[in-house]
Image (tube, rainbow, N blue to C red):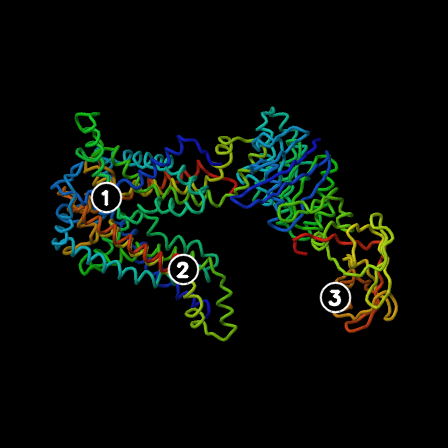
Amino acid sequence: MQIATPVLALFRVCIYAFLLAPIVVVVLASFNAGNFLTFPPQGLSLRWFWTFLQNDVFLDAIAYSAILAAASTAVSLVIGTMAALYFVRHAGREAETVRVGVLLPLILPEILTAIALLFFFYEIGIGTEHKIALFTGHVLMTLPFVFLNVTTSLQGRDDSVELAARTLGASRYTAFRRITLPLIAPGLATGAVFAFIISFDTFGVSFILKGTGSAPLPIQLYDYLRFNFTPEAAAVSTVSILLTLVLVTAADLLFGRKA
Amino acid sequence: MTEVSLRALQKLYGKTLALKGISLDVAHGEFVSLLGPSGCGKSTTLKCIAGFEEVSDGRICFDNKDISRKLPEDRDIGMVFQSYALFPHMTVAQNLAFGLEMRRLSKSVIAERVAKAMEMVQLTPYADRFPKALSGGQQQRVALARALVIEPAILLLDEPLANLDAKLRNEMRGFIRDLQKRVGITTIYVTHDQDEAMTMSDRVVVMFDGEIAQAATPEEVYDRPASERVARFVGNANILELPVMAVRDRAAGGFDLTLPGGTPLHLAAPAPWANGALRVMARPEQISLTDPGFGQLGGRVAKRYFSGGHVEYTIDTDCGPLLVLGPTTQAVHEGDAVGLTFDASRLWPMAPESGAKP
Amino acid sequence: MKRFRSYLLIAPTAALIFLFIVLPYVTVLIMSFRAPADGQPYGEGFSLGGYAQFFGQAYYAWSLPQTILLGMATTLICLVLGYPIALHIATASRKWRGLLYGIVLSPLLIGIVVRSYGWTILLGNSGVINATLRNLGVIDRPLPLMYNNFGVILALAHVFLPFMVLPLLSALQSMDPAIAQAARSLGARRFTIFRRVTFPVSMPGVQAGCILVFVLAISSYVTPALVGGMRVKTTTLLVVDALIDQFQWPFGSAMALVLAVSAGLIVLIFARLTRMKWT
């Protein structure tokens, strides 16, 4: 089946390069010593990382994004896991409806969902103040990822182990806590990491629902990029890429082998 | 019709030798089974014949023409896979037509041959169904027809019945065997099921560890196994180690052995290696139960399992536990003392094995 | 009782989806029929003004076919680039598969703003590509790679390529490898196997990937905004502009709905054309 002609192999290498190029370029640009994003770079330096570390706007944005991501991940982890349990264990004929329903935030265009939420929160008189709308948007965006990961790890398990625990005298709750929960822990962890990263990086809901005051990192970055061309944005992006890598690697080291 | 001959086939995977020099001749129209436990090299041998694996050394000839270097698509083989490997996006008729289209036959010829093939496997009413809408047995027959409709030089089957339930498997054995006889095609069949190999084949090739242990008719493999390992793989075998009292003819056969308790036992088979003692195989149905005190050897019933057509006993004797098949009419219970009589004409001596575990 | 208890598991999610997805989308639908007004988001009463405004002005109306073409081009490129990759990963050895899979998924883990920004660094007038070509003496003035459809489509293809590869990969991996062998044993050669067996059998993945990428591409905002520099006007950009910057809520909603309905129709037609009777 492999069509191992050299032309095709070359084509494949190009595609892999295409996939990695923009990310690599951002990281390289962040070490540019010049005042502008020129190529080839005018020497290497860490000055833009230093500039960024003194820029409260970006630091605040990172902190804000991290808190928002942690909070929305916590909520979607709980309700997403419950939904996954229902879907795998209890859903009968309505299973497909449940699945599509939970995945709606993923299937529907994010920007349209954000706009819909904006109208909705205005119509009920809350608006984008108090960040409730923004938070809701982030929970919606992260929920499908928790659901998908937990569903996968639940489906991979034989649910007779929980039944076995109950024949041995464990209550419904104990059986879940002692047997099922440890077994699906890798799925929960992967789901949580995914959710956190999605929330940290998502643009649409943040852009539309951010309200006034501080804004999440992607929005600050976007606003900055519209009018500035210094490598500081590249430094910020590199830090954000690094955070993601650390998170993914940590999750992989902790749970990768078991998942 | 085609003769297949394998000449000292070797297959290396990295540093492990999966096939250690397989030589085999399959006559035209013959049905040969490759039988052995998983990992014995039977599937690898089949894949080499089909061309999906390249041989590391040795030759494969069809009608004395070396085809070892040919691509699978040029070998003119019909193959049935364990998973059937039906094309899910094509109807039954389209599946059958595929190989003929590859041969660039005219539409009318294709239609005619597909129709005939579907009739042959009794699937005419299902011509326009997709594989998903067929039962396991029907899918199996489509796979068979798809392999045969191209009128290949040889037919290769890779554990084709493994995914069917027991009842259907029995039906399909007969079906495949009859079809093969009717078409008269040279067939190589891979299986790990000894019953399947015995009932279907003209010749059974027993393989262990990448080597052929024995290639013979089913009767011969069962009654006169080449080694203890073959004896145990092909059915149940009681092995008794008995001292030789007298040798009449080492090569032509004729030994006087003695059972514990002193009863003499005559072995008619040849055993050129015979020395002070011989290991002798007796199949469970070659031993019969009599009253205690009678027969050639005494024992006690340790276990009794009723299995419908007959009763399976484990008898504790001075030769160790022996497996014996008895008729269901016999009133023998666990704990009873019994006598045992051997069918001396079918006793078979075991050749000593060098290195291989029994 | 037991049934009731199990409903408690789905209740929070069901409430969340109903309250914050279903109702808000209904709000958009209603909003699109409200009367436009000046100086405030919307006026009293209902009208078709929003729709009239969209279809009545060429500037807006023309954005729709352009956006759809942009989406189709992105989808096509993703398919052409994604298929060899999916095939490669599906047939790669276990050792390589993890790494290749990682390369394909890595863009997903990097924010869309950062990725689009990466493309601006590559494609800009003094960006990596133009600078290199100029230094090599191939060109004297920068090639227009950015702020046009070319740049936007390229960047969109990059951003959504993983969404094409993943369904393709799952279709290819769920395919019985013996099928290709069976085709060979029947006399088919490599290209024939691809054309007659592998590709048609992976059709469910092709379909899913194309639909996903198309929908994502036409509704994306950041990439066209950054790489297109507001010079490539997609309907989605206009929607956000109308809603956020101009406060014309009925007009923006009408536009969003026209885009959504058009996308839905195209997806339906596509699904109909690529319908598989055998699944």
Q: How far apart in space, not on screen, are marks 2 and 1 (Cα)?
A: 32 Å
Q: Position of residue A5 (x, y in %)?
A: 43, 31
Look at label 3 and name its amino acid.
Answer: Pro
Question: Can you say which quadrant of the picture contains the C terminus of chain A?
Answer: bottom left
Residue A142, quarter of the rendered image: bottom left
Residue C28 is marked as none
Question: Which residue bears the numbered disc 2?
Answer: A84
Q: Are marks 2 and 1 on the same chain?
A: no
Question: Which residue bears the numbered disc 3?
Answer: B321
Chain under numbered label 1: C
Q: Are marks 3 and 1 on the same chain?
A: no
Q: Secondary structure at mark 1?
A: helix
Residue A130, quarter of the rendered image: bottom left
In front here: B110 or B243? B243
Look at label 1 and name its amino acid.
Answer: Val
Q: In percent of the image, x 31 and y 40: which residue is there? A: A19
